[in-house]
Amino acid sequence: MKLGILDQMPQPKGKTAEQTAAHTIDMAQTAENLGYERYWFAEHHATRGMVSSAPEIMMATVASRTRTLKVGSGGILLPQYSPFKVASQIAQLESLFPGRIEAGVGRSPGGGEFIRKLLADGKPNQMAEYPDKLKDLIQYLDGSARVRAAPRTTARPELHSLGLGENSAVLAGILGIGYVFGHFIRPDRGVEAFRAYHDAFEPGFMAQPSARACAFVVCGEDDKHAEALAQSQDIWLLNVEKGLDSQVPTPEAAQKKYEALTEAEREKVKHNRRRMIIGGPETVRAELDHYSALYECDDWLILCNLHDWEEKKRSFERLAEIYL
């Protein structure tokens, strides 16, 4: 099993953005020491609770503080930006950290229409242009466009497209790039997405297919301990979906909220658990092995959005003890 981390840099209630950033660097160094292969950063805007708004900067920072850890973006919001500028940033990173850069791009607007316009400097919505922008990005990186993005590195970084179903998977396959499936968002489309990607893949920017999945995982000492830990993540996700405070609540606040959940909210929490793997080491191994076999995918990016940083670190440690 190959394991990496996808970090949204969730900010716990009571902590600052500066503290969260410092903790993230420490967490990446810990991940490298534990044997995790990669550390990716999300891109989120207009939120108090997710500190990762510039994955390119976090990639450079973490790569400079580690030795062998691969760093990536999961993912840069390509529809809002110039593909040439994105290609230049990726090439610059590759020149600084050869062989350690994994660029992931996605189709998300980054927030509501107001935020999308700010990111795109007021330009019209270009979400439908994602396939064309992705093709342009590839050509600026591989030199097939009239202009190649500088610096012109000896080797090319890996390039992946993020997606939630068959359409995004087929696009990545046809273009010959990697594919990353968001199980932590749409767990019901994984089987079809991975099958579609492998069926559609043609060697292109990358010679071999590269498919991985992302999931929330909380690995406790045992199932009971994991359930207690996961409450802060459950309530955090519920708040995010409602557009409420996106900072991760304390265990005490999460438990209080749990006790006051309406029937509809309890159903939503139960539904969201399909996006997560929660349990002690034996349970986590059984569920992750199950989905790996189902998806025919042994490459995972793990999210763990707990309030307690030490518990979060120990969750990653237990997962490493299982597989690494």
Image: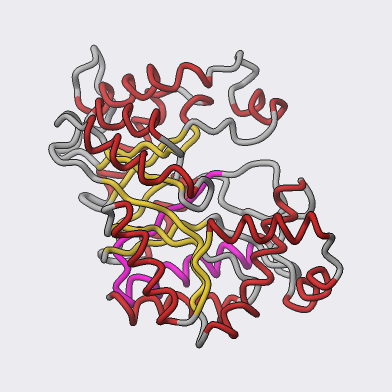
Labels in figure, total: 0
Q: Quadrant of the C terminus?
A: bottom left
Looking at the picture, tell me which residue is in the foreground, 166 or 62.
166
Q: Is residue 218 above or below residue 270?
A: below
Percent across and percent down for residue 235 are 72, 63
Compare residues 196 and 84 and report the one nearer the observer.
196
Residue 210: x %, y % from top left: 24, 45
Residue at 56% of width from left, 51% of height from top?
Answer: 52
Membership of 16 in magenta stretch: no
Query: 242 above or below 16?
Result: above
Identify the image quadrant of the N terminus: bottom left
The residue furthest bottom is 221
Q: Would residue 284 be found to the left or right of residue 206 on screen?
A: right
Query: Does 48 sit left or right of 310 as displayed?
Result: right
**Residue sitting at x 24%, y 42%:** 157
Q: Is 30 contained in the magenta span?
A: yes
Magenta stretch, residue numbers: 18-43
